[in-house]
Amino acid sequence: MNESTEIIQEILQSLNLDTAYRTASLTLLEKGESRYLRDFKLNLTSTLTSAHLSEKECALLGLSAAVNNNNLPLTNYYTQYAEAQGATAADVAEAAGCASLLASNNIFYRFRHFTQKEKYTQIPARIRMQLMMKPVTGKEFFELMSLAISAVNGCEMCVNAHEDSLIKLGTTEERIFDAVRIASLVTATGKIVF
């Protein structure tokens, strides 16, 4: 067994997947004995820790990003990890709901931003957003998840709005940065494990 296969098996075991599991992407990395696999493993591990976020928050951010990317293996993994860190069923549901709500908001507000027509800002959005009003994970953390998902989805308007809200709530830029870092690494992981 070569080093690439060993690293892949370690990654798969950490994700609670069968070590025989392969995607086309994993197979390419394995056959090419890619040095990237070491980085991939370390990047995945780094989604679980932060000097500025609790392990539960890291897990919920990972879960929201996995749901946003429609990635079942990673959704299962981050759900289990979040629960192990004390997340309730309501916390987990909110992370999933945030991904869905932001998918619609990001498309809608990106459209408004791209067209830059005043008329579209005057028409009511008619998108229900009760989840944002009294989030079980707290206003600050829901804004943090919303920002991270908006960054993944590439909505400049939403990123700026959520970042501004977070700064006004007293969130540090380091905390914001780590939330986006985690969402970006979960998205990158989903290109290999899906």
Image: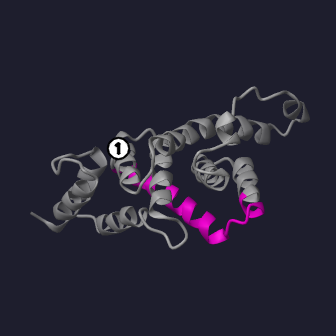
Q: Residue furthest bottom?
A: 51
Residue 71 higher or lower than 152, as above or below:
above
Residue 179 falls inside the magenta stretch: yes
Colour scheme of the rendered structure = one colour
Residue 141 locus on image (x, y percent):
61, 55
Secondary structure beneath disc 1? Answer: helix
Residue 153 image point, x, y percent = 59, 46
Q: Which residues are magenta?
A: 166-192
* Residue depicted at 28% across the width and 53% down the height: 15
Q: Is residue 104 magenta?
A: no
Q: Residues within 10 Å of mark 1 (few under 14, many from 20)?
A: some
Rendered image quadrant of residue 14: bottom left
Of 111 and 11, which appears nearest the observer? 11
Q: Which residue is mark 1?
A: 76
Q: Residue furthest left?
A: 1
Which quadrant holds residue 49?
A: bottom left
Kind of residue indicated by mark 1? Asn
Residue at 49 percent of width and 48 percent of height:
65
